[in-house]
Amino acid sequence: MASSQEVQPVATMTLATPVVQRTVASTELRPWGSFTILEEGRGYKIKRIEVKPGHRLSLQMHHHRSEHWIVVSGTALVVCGDAENILHANQSTYVPQCTRHRLENPGVIPLVLIEVQNGEYLGEDDIIRFQDDYARTV
């Protein structure tokens, strides 16, 4: 004979602050290549960056964000503070907030990397340029 079991209510947990995620997938072209915003949420943004062979981004810094760079394919020449390093596929680096940095593709194929930005403000206007091959000021 089957026994009856009492059903107990399941406790649920409510998050105090909901995590807001949105998938953006918008691509912006630049003289050095392009970037695509893959996802953006509170305090973070994830980009796919592609740098054309022989091109580089400006020597720059950000007051409000740090960045993690993970190389997917190609070769990256990274300037971060006083250090200069070459990165290949499956290697990564960290760029602290308020640190001068530059990304360059010294190779012959496109450089593709994933950039994870962290900070309270992630707008493109938080770029202070010190040198720029394309004479941009903003």
Image: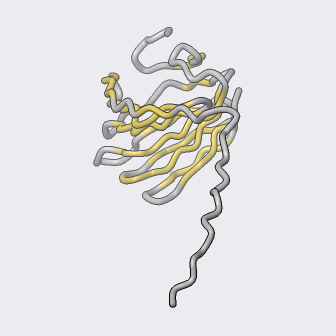
Rendered location of residue 115, percent (x, y): 50, 40
Nearer the observer, 86 or 17: 17
Picture layout, residue 95 above or below residue 10: above
Q: Nearer the viewer, residue 118 or 103?
A: 118
Work out whether 86 lies above or below 17.
below
Asked if one can make out residue 110 in the rendered structure from this viewpoint, the answer is yes
Task: Pinpoint residue 96: horizontal percent, then vertical percent.
Answer: 69, 36
Q: Residue furthest bottom?
A: 1
- Say whether residue 55 is left or right of residue 101: left
Residue in the image at 51% along x and 86% along y: 2
Where 27 falls versus 130 (above or below)?
A: below
132, 126: nearer the viewer: 126
Extreme top residue here? 137
Residue 98 position, x and y percent, is 71, 26
Vertical relation: 6 (above or below) 80: below
Location of residue 56 by image quarter: top left
Residue 3 locus on image (x, y percent): 57, 83
On the rendered structure, is 72 left or right of 7?
A: left
Q: Residue at x 70, y 34 (%)?
A: 16
Which quadrant holds residue 22? top left
